[in-house]
Amino acid sequence: MSTETLTIARALNLGLRKAMEDDAKVVLMGEDIGRLGGVFRITDGLQKDFGEARVVDTPLAEAGIVGTAVGLAMRGYRPVCEIQFDGFVFPACNQIVTQVARMHARSKGRLPMPIVIRIPFGGGIGAVEHHSESPEAYFAHTAGLKVVAVSNPADAYWGIQQAIASPDPIVFLEPKRRYWEKADVDLDAIPGPLFASRVVRGGDDVTVLAYGPMVKTALQAAEAAAGEGRSLEVFDLRSVSPLDLDPVMASVRRTGRCVVVHEAPTSLGLGAEIAARITESCFHSLEAPVLRVGGYDTPYPPSKLEEEYLPDLDRVLDAVDRAMEF
Amino acid sequence: MSTETLTIARALNLGLRKAMEDDAKVVLMGEDIGRLGGVFRITDGLQKDFGEARVVDTPLAEAGIVGTAVGLAMRGYRPVCEIQFDGFVFPACNQIVTQVARMHARSKGRLPMPIVIRIPFGGGIGAVEHHSESPEAYFAHTAGLKVVAVSNPADAYWGIQQAIASPDPIVFLEPKRRYWEKADVDLDAIPGPLFASRVVRGGDDVTVLAYGPMVKTALQAAEAAAGEGRSLEVFDLRSVSPLDLDPVMASVRRTGRCVVVHEAPTSLGLGAEIAARITESCFHSLEAPVLRVGGYDTPYPPSKLEEEYLPDLDRVLDAVDRAMEF
Amino acid sequence: MTASPRTTEVVDPVPGAAAPHLPPASGQCTVQLLTPEGDRVEHPEYSLDIDADELRGLYRDMALVRRWDAEATALQRQGELGIWASLLGQEAAQVGAGRALAESDTAFPTYREHGVAWTRGVDPLHVMSLYRGVDNGGWDPVATRFSPYTIVIGAQCLHATGYAMGVQRDGAEQAVLAFLGDGATSQGEVNEAMIWAASFSAPVVFFCQNNQYAISVPLERQSRVPLYQRAAGFGFPGVRVDGNDVLAVLAVTRAALQAAREGQGPTFIEAFTYRMGAHTTSDDPTRYRLASELEEWKLRDPIARLKAHLSRGGLADAAFFDVVEAEADELAARIRSGTVGMPDPAPTEMFDHVHAEQTPYLAAQREDFVAYSASFGEGVER
Amino acid sequence: MTASPRTTEVVDPVPGAAAPHLPPASGQCTVQLLTPEGDRVEHPEYSLDIDADELRGLYRDMALVRRWDAEATALQRQGELGIWASLLGQEAAQVGAGRALAESDTAFPTYREHGVAWTRGVDPLHVMSLYRGVDNGGWDPVATRFSPYTIVIGAQCLHATGYAMGVQRDGAEQAVLAFLGDGATSQGEVNEAMIWAASFSAPVVFFCQNNQYAISVPLERQSRVPLYQRAAGFGFPGVRVDGNDVLAVLAVTRAALQAAREGQGPTFIEAFTYRMGAHTTSDDPTRYRLASELEEWKLRDPIARLKAHLSRGGLADAAFFDVVEAEADELAARIRSGTVGMPDPAPTEMFDHVHAEQTPYLAAQREDFVAYSASFGEGVER
Ligand SMILES: Cc1ncc(C[n+]2csc(CCOP(=O)(O)OP(=O)(O)O)c2C)c(N)n1
Ligand SMILES: Cc1ncc(C[n+]2csc(CCOP(=O)(O)OP(=O)(O)O)c2C)c(N)n1
Ligand SMILES: [Mg+2]
Ligand SMILES: [Mg+2]
């Protein structure tokens, strides 16, 4: 069994390489992904090895990247688009919402859209405006799209390959501030399903839900809570759309309490949908309302304030306390 | 007291005219709004009376319409942009989300954005693809934007004037399928606040929330329910962001039951946010979870199926039944 | 036009809106092979050698699609369609471009390319179903090499360019034809498509039907120079052709597609034509254009022009025209009965193609929907 | 370049990426008034009569902003800034364009226009605060007529065009200067801005600093023809100027702004220059360009060029250069201490400017935040 210690960044790089080896139709497109290997070096070395026809340095236009990917998909290719930073996906909004998400339905299934749109997302890296956003709710509200967010190297390695192999368009969110965090990855393992949530820590008092960069935060909170004799069950949702909530609901029926954590603004963030669904399904088991810990309803602030803006261990624990005291 | 019987379309036309008379800085921009008066004739006659400098037939580019509006606002104008149909707002997404919504914060208040983005929204008119959408959740999730949806001629007449007078950017949603419905409008009345919800029918059993085109549907449901001896309290939310939920919560504490209705896909639609907030604030008063009646999580279907897709009287009553039986 | 900075009155006319949109005066750099009177003329760069059969074929195509269009307009008036976008006046541009395609080429239409659909062998009823609200177009885009109608202005231009990049990667000798209108040239995405096509030298031809209007907005609002000149700014050739001259359109489009297949990259074609009808059946053109303009253009009717050429040249006799007429009647009848008799889609259809792999949550919504409908005794098929 | 459709290998080179990006060979249609050696040359269309004071002023501007830039880069290395986007090599383009502005004109920068900010009287510390993460730029865009830095590539071009439409409506004799990079020319919104500017004949000048790269992507990926030619496709003049020649930039930009003020509409200026530093302090240019390229461009250094002209022409003596040197030292010291001593913003700031009229819900979030912070004994000012 070959196990390697990988960062999320390196795992993505290897996963992309594997996907390109497995399927000659896989084409990577994006700004600076070729020669430079991407600003985060996720595609490092791939243009050298697979050529400029399969790792395409594009003109500076996100609508162009996604719109031409639609055409390549129609031609039988499997485009993997890199959006350089979360804040720069908006010029591609029209192609994503009105074209990528609907072509399969529009054509009654005759034109599948096996397109992956990779987006390094979230804050915490001390960047300037537009480099720390969490746009997942826009895509999760868009029928026809699937949205996943990875939190660790193993999911990054397998997830990117599974996303590329999927016949449906997938917005693939990468927790940029965790890119350099390491873990062991078993490169021979048989990966679990892409669209499934996972319990990453068992517990009995409160069920805590997170995805992407907030999974680590939730686990830190659980660790701290344990010190205070409180046991939190932590889920890595992994798939933001579709949501895999059955296991979550089973947990909530046990704990009676639930806290959802994400960086995106709280209003109409994923926490809203999750709270609504859990409340509807677990109404009689709930000891407290599902509580949300998210970004404030403000633009992402200048980096000197991002620690105040971002959910952290303390804010999660605060919500846990409120859930317990309810 | 001068009261006139007006359609929503006519009320908007008169409201725009009044706003242009009151403030020479008001400029209307959009596709076909001049000579043609707009595809819905909302701007009928305005270019003739106010000239081509104040009622601007623009090139065919939504990003251009909103992006130049930003510049006009910086120069001290009050642009009112018409997006011809809901489905065509997405090319303007980047300007709306990264510029309009943030310029005030970015400039620490030095650059207010008194921009109104008018969007005829919603389905039910037998149109082809992209002409029946409900994109409000995208904007309500965007910090820095305000979003209102009118449901009747009086709110249309006053609301458009209040929105134009507001120093903040507002997405102004017009229920296109109700454009031709009439009501008396007192043109001398003192209008209530723009961002306030309103009880449009009192009741005791279930609190029903709607906005825009669904208000009429909710009222029809209340009428039918009354026949079955059930009394529904119906709210016209009017403002989608910010939400004015205090009066709603007072009602829910009384009824113990709440149903939210909108046309937009249910997942991450406004119903999700409203359910989450009401549940958090009224937890101990709720006899049943807040139930949502919305569009399915599919692209808006071909018009032959829209009646199956759109929430109607029966689906609202069905949710009311479920809330009562819970 | 130049705005005087001193007054707001003249800042924003729709320039030229007042002036009627007349066909390009002869002598302008517009490729023409058949005069409005039906006389064959030569062009230094674009020759076309075409036999009588082909000429009659082009006439037949144009006559049939015009009849289809008239029938569709009538059906809409009678409430059988939700809306209809007429191609009246643009038959030569569409049939000429469509017939220039090789079988293995691929076309990306807007919502008005019924004439192109016809040349691709798309069943008219598969177009009617879209405007009836039964589906978003019933044809098979893969088999017909005719992509779905695109209603979001310009979005298809990027699809066409990306598809052409795929053709390059396959090393195939095929070309792609992207259709767009004059108004579409203002969309950012359309300009991006041209930038990409140039940058990658993609085998795509942009075929712009300049029918003078974007709904009510005249061309001058979109560009103050002829549209074909746009291409030079992006570094590839642009050419203007008389869009009511089916022979010129055929010749120019053929040449551009061949150049694309040979790896010479993109071309922009401006087919100068006129929308003789309303924008759609919902539109009222009398609000924004002069009747005299339409009269002018009727003298350039693309079908009459070819008919004159065929008759005077003795290339077709009365019998031929009678046969086409009869065919048109048949077609119209088939379209009418097929449209009126078109079954509504199964309500569950709306759930069934959202994803290639349906999600459990959507499957559950579908189940609930079926059960809910059943509760009304509506037999919704599963 | 032309792609052969037969093989995928050559489908997608970044054309010209291999070839170094050299300055335009003389004889090309690039406006130059000062040779790299510092000799004054005449140009048929663009003359500049400028006195020694002004010349020394331009030198001073360029020397000071270069020093500011160097200090900022050093401060970033020392962890005092989150990131820095260097203007090294583009001083002439920015100072020349900035000094061409009349006081009542308005400029719309990207994120790299520190040299323009300087000419607008923006306090360098108000730019430093952005890159330190204290705010999104501290200057008053209304008072300085210098709009906020725009990081979303190209978005400011539409703002500039809209602002110019406002100038028209005011009947004011003012012009607007929109800055953009070579990469930005591929964004749909930028092309829309040019389409709008042409359609409305808006008094806006598009000033494109072609510094040869969009991060790692060379110009050839964005356009296979010189960028200034883009404008002709939209129907307005485009001109290429030696971007390392401050006099030529000043003359060309002045003329374009004056034309705009006089109601002659937009102009596109391509300032041909070179990004001598990294894209930002996070970038490593050795991964994508040749050292020899940089060496070539050093011979065209914009500051050395003017210095040679001043010295040889006896327009400035050693004393002058010493004074500027001393001023630069002072400025650098002020920037350093001002940056290092910059107070962090109050956390509540993030709530306070979201709307002009704050919503009750956000006010409540602010209150909760204050209370929550207080619970840690953090004295968050209200
Ligand atoms: C993005 C977008 N904005 C607006 C519309 C509404 N609309 C439909 S057709 C049309 C005019 C198109 O004009 P043109 O490109 O010249 O094509 P034509 O209809 O003349 O064939 C407009 C504005 C749309 N479909 N898509
Ligand atoms: C819409 C958008 N996409 C991507 C980026 C990331 N990005 C920042 S600078 C840059 C390159 C810009 O190149 P150019 O326009 O030539 O300006 P330069 O940096 O060379 O001055 C890119 C891709 C961005 N800021 N905005
Ligand atoms: Mg047109
Ligand atoms: Mg550059």
Image (tube, coloured by chain):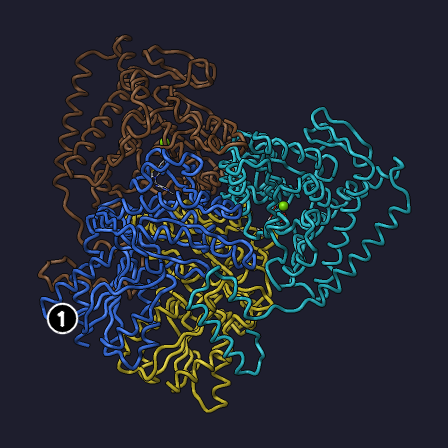
Chain colours: A yellow, B blue, C brown, D cyan
Question: Residue at (16%, 17%) from the top-left corner?
Answer: C322
Q: Which residue is mark 1?
A: B230
Left or right, B36 with respect to D151, comes to left
* Percent coordinates x, y for residue D371 in the rendering: 50, 79
* Percent coordinates x, y for residue A59 in the rendering: 54, 45
Say few, some or many: other residues with alpha carbon within 10 Å of mark 1 (under 14 / 14 to 19 / 20 or more): some
Answer with the quarter of the image where residue A192 lies.
Answer: bottom left
Answer with the quarter of the image where residue C80 lies.
Answer: top left
**Circle 1 chain:** B
Q: Is residue C76 above or below residue A17?
A: above
Where is ligand 4, by quadrant? Answer: top right
* Percent coordinates x, y for residue D17 in the rendering: 63, 43
Left or right, A68 with respect to A107, comes to right
Q: Is residue C240 above or below residue D151?
A: above
State the residue lying farthest toward the front.
B1
Quadrant the C terminus of chain C occupies = bottom left
Tell me which amino acid carries mark 1. Arg
Q: Is residue C349 above or below residue C211?
A: below
Q: Is residue B146 above or below residue D35?
A: below
* Percent coordinates x, y for residue A44 in the rendering: 58, 57
Quick one: SS at disc 1? loop
State the residue lying farthest toward the bottom.
A229
Is any part of residue A26 visible from this angle? no
Question: Residue at (30%, 21%) from the top-left corner?
Answer: C294
Q: How many marks?
A: 1
Left or right, C350 with respect to B141, comes to left
Is any part of residue A69 visible from this angle? yes
